[in-house]
Amino acid sequence: MVLRIPLRRSASFTPDPQSLVEVPSPAMQRMEANVLVLGADRVGKSALTVRFLTRRFIGEYGDTKSIYSHSLAVEGREILFHIWDFSYSQDGADESSAEEKRVQWADGFILVYSICDRASFNILHPKVQFIKAAKEATSQEKVPIVIVGNKRDLHHQRVVSSEEGRLLALSVDCGFYEVSAAEAYHGSLMVFQGLAERFCEAKLAPKRGTGIRGIVKSMSAVFARKRTDSL
Ligand SMILES: Nc1nc2c(ncn2[C@@H]2O[C@H](COP(=O)(O)OP(=O)(O)OP(=O)(O)O)[C@@H](O)[C@H]2O)c(=O)[nH]1
Ligand SMILES: [Mg+2]
């Protein structure tokens, strides 16, 4: 199957007056990031994305096959997110090469499960491993990933505890949030802010291999060169 990257466009949902993007000061550093929202069917990927874009919960989302652009000011930086809310149900059987291309397109990932759906939680560990293996093969930066347990409002139907979610995130070094896209805007904002912070950290963190080992390696290389130069 051919990877069909949907057209990029700005959010087509009508924003309420409060959701207008903050105008950044001229000194603000700008960054752009492609974000892939992933997870099992019906866990609330679109609900979470639309909440972030518009502050609204509209209940049913239909075909949201687009990349939406939305910016956020975090720690003195303006990050322009291009958000791809991906649904497997729209693409039917998906080939791993298509998934690999989607993963390569993205700079950051939001992995959503429903706290009422154990299977949607279980698929996340292998998903994180797949993403890390694919990204870290081509880049030395740490991959920004946040794991989101959605539908927190449905506590009577809960089958995945908060601790399990938190432990999974800790074990794979990802951010973690439990939210209800249905109940509040704040949770979705925290998710995207958390991802933005991870994105900035990844950009600012020293590349792998430039730590103390990297320094020792480059110093040895310099001394080795001097020795050969003097021969
Ligand atoms: N109670 C509750 N329902 C939610 C929440 N988030 C989403 N839903 C509902 O769950 C259903 C699926 O939500 P979607 O946002 O369409 O889920 P999705 O993961 O985008 O689904 P697909 O794109 O079809 O895979 C809808 O009926 C939503 O109204 C939530 O936080 N709480
Ligand atoms: Mg959807």
Image (cartoon, grey):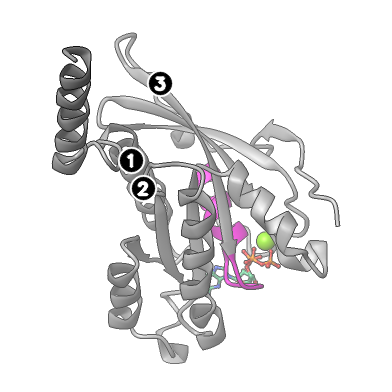
Front residue of 76/19: it is 76
- Given this view, does label 3 or label 1 mark the residue nearer the observer? 1
> Compared with residue 93, is residue 6 higher up or lower down, i.e. above or below?
above
x and y percent of residue 231 in the render? 19, 15
Judging by the rendered image, the residue that carries numbered circle 3 is: 30
Distance from mark 2 CB to nearest ligand 1 atom below 8 Å: no
Left or right: 185 in relation to 77: right
**Tags 2 and 1 in contact by the CB under 8 Å rule?**
yes
Distance from mark 3 CB to nearest ligand 2 atom below 8 Å: no
Q: Amino acid at mark 2?
A: Lys
Q: CA distance from mark 2 to mark 1?
A: 5 Å
* Mark 1 residue element: helix
Q: Residue placed at 74% from the left, 55% from the top?
A: 98
Q: Earlier in the sequence, mark 2 or mark 1?
A: 2
- Write the start and end of the magenta stretch as one range: 39-54
Q: Amino acid at mark 1?
A: Ala
Judging by the rendered image, the residue that carries numbered circle 1 is: 202
- Given this view, does label 3 or label 2 mark the residue nearer the observer? 2
Q: Earlier in the sequence, mark 3 or mark 2?
A: 3
x and y percent of residue 38 in the render? 58, 61
Front residue of 98/216: it is 216
x and y percent of residue 91 in the render? 81, 62
Q: Residue placed at 55% from the left, 79% from the top?
A: 120
- For ligand 1, the image quadrant comes to bottom right
Quadrant of the rendered structure where residue 14 is? top right
One can see residue 55 in this view: no
The stretch drawn in magenta includes residue 119:
no
* Mark 2 residue element: loop
Judging by the rendered image, the residue that carries numbered circle 2 is: 142
> Compared with residue 82, is residue 123 higher up or lower down, i.e. above or below?
below
Q: Earlier in the sequence, mark 3 or mark 1?
A: 3
- Number of numbered discs present? 3
